[in-house]
Amino acid sequence: MELAERGRALVGVEIDPAAVKALALSLRDRSNVRIVEGSILRTAVDELLPAPYRVIGNIPYNLTGALFVHLLEQPTPPARIDLVVQQEVAERLVAPPGGWSMATLGVRVYGTPELVLRVPRTAFLPQPKVDSALVRIIPDAEPALPRSDLPSFFDFVTPFFQARRKQLPFVLGRKLGISGAEARTRLRVIGIDPARRAETLTLEEWRRLFENARAN
């Protein structure tokens, strides 16, 4: 109701038919609100409202990684994203290199996340088992890599995070079909210590590693 009162135009996406009916009933006097029934992960979000638009939500936590990527990959991405997620996930998203996950890298390609507000579990009814946090992302004008390269980039980096306990040469060697010694040499050439692991690399180092692997 607060968003309906504050927003000039509001579109809600809800997958539960019963919740759609309840929302339509409770918001029937709000001509500025439209409710769409469906999965947010299958919705062309940038077609719901004209740009610039914002995305706001308190989401099912199992959708977090996929939803951030889905929103940021829109042909016309949101001007701003504000989502309530599990606090542990929020802290990983905003962490400096050293504790990155695949989701962290996926978000950092498009912009820099900010932890805006911590929300204790006691703020919810019924009370969940975890604390939450509000994460904000204002996407950059362009991703860190050309959009045409992003599918190949994410395909390249995924195995490194799937074997995150392994040092970089182990995965790079298997990925490129080269020996461990050659993988270590390639890493040194681009200024990356072969003893490091996936979660320690910066976005710029991932870009260098990807471009080097593709060029060779």
Image: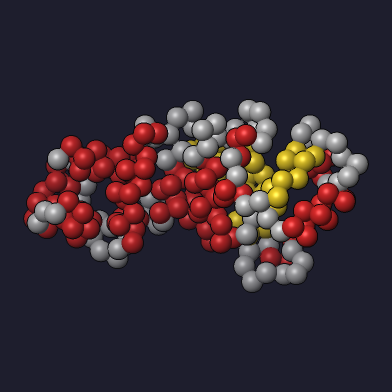
Q: x and y percent of residue 115 in the render?
A: 58, 48
**Where, quadrant-wise, is the C terminus in this rendering?**
top left
- Mark count: 0
**From this viewpoint, which residue is outermost toward the right?**
29
Residue occupying the point 41% across, 48% down: 105
Query: Could you tell me if residue 81 is visible in this image?
Result: no
Asked whether, in this view, residue 206 is left or right of residue 75, the answer is left
Query: Could you tell me if residue 19 is visible in this image?
Result: yes
Asked whether, in this view, residue 209 is left or right of residue 118, the answer is left
Q: x and y percent of residue 38 in the render?
A: 66, 51
For residue 175, which quarter of the picture?
bottom left
Q: Of residues 109 and 114, which is closer to you in this image?
A: 109
Residue occupying the point 11% across, 48% down: 185
Vertical placement of residue 122 versus 171, above or below: below
**From this viewpoint, which residue is outermost toward the bottom?**
129
Q: Of residues 98 and 69, which is closer to you in this image?
A: 69
For residue 15, which quarter of the picture?
bottom right
Q: x and y percent of residue 207 in the render?
A: 30, 40
Asked whether, in this view, residue 29 is left or right of residue 65, the answer is right
Q: x and y percent of residue 183 in the render?
A: 14, 52
Asked whether, in this view, residue 166 is left or right of residue 124, the answer is left
Vertical placement of residue 76 versus 44, above or below: above
Q: Of residues 136 and 58, which is closer to you in this image?
A: 58
For residue 17, which quarter of the picture?
bottom right
Residue occupying the point 49% across, 46% down: 69
